[in-house]
Image (cartoon, rainbow, N blue to C red):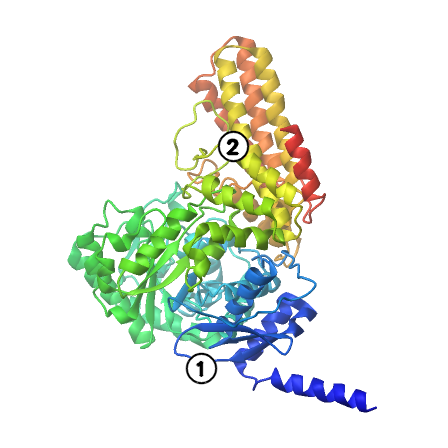
Amino acid sequence: MKFSISVATALLILAVACSAPATPDTEAAKSLAGRILGNASRHFVFEQLEADKDVFRIETRGGKTVISGNNANSMAVGLNHYLKYYCNVNVGWFVSDKVSLPARFPKLEQPVEVSARVPERFFLNYCTFGYTMPWWTWKDWEHFIDWMALNGVNLPLAITGQESIWYQIWTELGLTDEEVRSYFTGPAHLPWHRMLNIDRWGGPLPQSWLEGQAELQKQIVARERELNMRPVLPAFAGHVPSELQRLYPEAQIERMSDWAGFAEEDFPHFLDPMDPLFPKIQKLFIQKEKEIYGTDHIYGIDLFNEMIPRSWEPDYLSRVSRQVYESLEAADPEGVWLQMTWLFYNERQYWTPDKIEPYITSYPAEKSLLLDYYCEKMEVWQRTERYYGVPYIWCYLGNFGGNTYLAGDIEDVNKRIENTFANGGDNLRGIGSTLEGFDCNPFMYQFIFEKAWDFPAHQNLETYSKVLADSRTGKADENARAAWSKLLKDIYIAPTVPGHSPIHNLRPSFARSSSYHSSVKFTYQNEDLREVIRLLLAADGSGSAYEFDLVNLTRQYMSNAFEADFAAYKTAWEQKDKTAMDALRDKMLGTFDQLEELLSSQTYFLVGKWIADARSWGANEEEADYFESNARNLLTSWGDRGNLLTDYADRSWAGLISTYYKGRWERFFQAVDQAYAEGADFDKAHEDQLLEELKDFEADWWQNRPGTFPATPTGNSVELVKKALSIN
């Protein structure tokens, strides 16, 4: 009896030693750990630190891992650091990414303390809400918000559900239900409606969508605030329904210019910020947004995204930005205006420093926050005397359209960030990422957010490659470490560009032009990639990240090989070598089948899941069909027949590979064989005829929705990689 009392007393003492007063932050961190780790979260204790900056501390105390931080967000970063650096555990950004935990949690001999280098860590892009998130439910968002916290994000873009507020505003001003819902685009295209690029296409939005998204946004912002994030909410940027002119005939409303080849009926309309109606609408919107979603007083407003201002006169640019700020200030005196500076890169021939300076300095700098949007390609802070003292965030874009393509120059990115810390000025406020879609290089984004903290491993990429290898393989292994060292040195050596795509995802043609959407060249030797895959197989790892990496790298290897095969096929055509043509045709069509089987083993690469998620938002079968058509369209035609953005969001996904992409190439090979049989050159007339046939095929695929596709993975990823490599 005395022995049992002694044990009980010891346990009580241990419990007291590992406990501290609970706070909202420690409770939020504890809940996050429970969602990520399940019952294993009992091993962790969270404590509050008093600090004037973001900081976390990890230590072993009484057999527990104690993670302290100044707030829940810092504690989450500490938890992620411990899991990744000490347990070889990678937490992915999708809810389907399973977390594999060690049998025992390692003890720390000495406490580890790390501070943030910058106060702000921004994430997301308007486009991400179309290319990745349009069909997400709370289950997806809940895990992703946890992922953001684990990676230290504290300034997330939060634009879900705004259409429900705009619906109320426009109908209260006198527009009809039909006018308003028809003004909105289809769900997947809403980001470009929000950015003043297109109206109406794919509408009208169902009322059920408006209501469902509003409820989802309430959950999103509540959880983000619980984890010490300040959601960046939308505000009025001048975009109005054309029918508003009927109610306000004196208002200065103009039709904007063409964008991406959409029809004139889809052109958006812009209310001049200097019109007295502008501040009225701003105040109405922000008041209602506050009532429904609350506010952290930071708002995203972008006036001229891929659009040309009425005037390039510096005085006009200064007046218009000042007027927008004053409308925001009147609606929320604490409001801060956040804007992306993609326009300073994309229209850089117009946005010269003499125009940028008056545009961004016409209102108080402390009320502004700029996103240097595409820093791996061009750092605007270097062109603008560090943004003339206006606070800014260095951002890595990394992906266009959600394309499935290995890209990212990690060494150059590392150097650019360090140079910005050294020379970017006191107005550098943060590090962020503005990816258009969740892509196939997830470690690059984790790396970006780790750069916002004082982690010594980042000073040496060879050291960091070992951390990546261990966490993504699930164990320390020399083969995996050699693979990741080679990946960072030899494969990830070029930044992403628009249209980074495997050639088999694009419309087939002998007359391939260097168009905006067909950047298929890679800057490494494909055999180097094969060697990386061989090393990873030899590592015999485990877990979601390991299996994903194997499939992802093999997918790219096979895609690169397809490009070489097509080059050989073109040569065979020029030489009129029909035997070689037939053999290469059969080999390329066989690659589609091999890719389909391989990609079907990963949830990440299933178009069936994308479609099933879209259909889940339908209140009835008709709505489900509507959402499915919209989901299919974005990945393929992007808009109407012959849209300029066709294939911009192409994906190497099972289902797309076997039906859509393979179907186009089958038609191409048939057309070439017919030309050969006729003894004709495959000239522009043949190309043009084929293009019209392909447009018909593409429209049928998204409009009539042929084929059904599995929404859950099948097959063993590792075995399928081995099989694919033995064939290729």
Image position of 169 with respect to 11: above or below: above
Q: How far is mark 1 from mark 2, CA to CA?
A: 52 Å
For the N terminus, the image quarter is bottom right
Circle on res. 526: 2
Circle on res. 50: 1
For the C terminus, the image quarter is top right
Q: Along the horizontal axis of the image, is 328 left or right of 446?
A: left
| Residue 378 picture location, percent across and down | 31, 48
Q: Is residue 185 visible?
A: no
Image position of 337 with respect to 181: above or below: below
Image position of 321 with respect to 405: above or below: below
Residue ID at (41%, 59%): 432
Extreme residue toward the right, this view: 1
| Residue 227 picture location, percent across and down | 51, 72
Q: How many marks?
A: 2
Quadrant housing residue 241: bottom left
Q: Along the horizontal axis of the image, is 601 left or right of 265?
A: right
In this orientation, which residue lies closer to the viewer: 282 or 227?
A: 227
